[in-house]
Amino acid sequence: MVTYRRGGYVQDGDDAVERGCDHCEWHAVADSYPELIGAYQRHLKAEHPKAWLRV
């Protein structure tokens, strides 16, 4: 059975991590934290460029 974690690193081979966007309904599930963060950052750059910028 797959266990979904909100952020953080996976601990077992059948764990997964999930993340939602604070700006829209986007949601992703990945097998690793780096993979998830990469997808989230690509989403922010494409869909919410002002949110991506650090001001």
Image (tube, grey):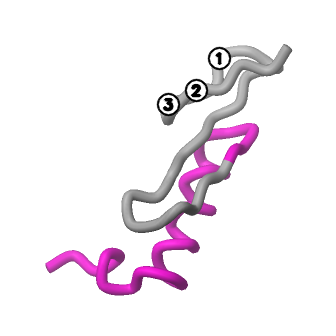
Task: Give residue 5's mark.
Answer: 2
Q: Secondary structure at mark 2?
A: strand
Percent position of residue 11, x then y: 65, 17
Q: Regarding mark 1 in the picture, which secondary structure is present there?
A: loop
The magenta span reads 29-55
Give neighbour class at mark 2: few <14, some 14-19, many 20+ (Cα, 10 Å).
some
Three-letter amino acid code of the residue under disc 3: Gly
* Amino acid type of the residue that numbered disc 1 sits on in the rendered structure: Gln
Residue drawn at x 46%, y 58% as measured from the top left: 21
Q: CA distance from mark 2 to mark 3?
A: 7 Å
Q: Are marks 2 and 3 in contact (CB under 8 Å)?
A: yes
User: Upstream in the sequence, badge 2 or badge 1?
Assistant: 2
Residue 39 quadrant: bottom right
Q: Position of residue 53 (x, y in %)?
A: 28, 80
Query: In the rendered image, which quarter contains the C terminus?
Result: bottom left
Residue located beneath label 3 in the image: 8
Please provide percent x and percent y for residue 31. 75, 38
- What residue occupies the far front of the structure in this picture? 25
Residue type for callout 2: Arg
Lateral position of residue 13 relative to residue 22, left or right: right
Name the residue tied to disc 1: 11
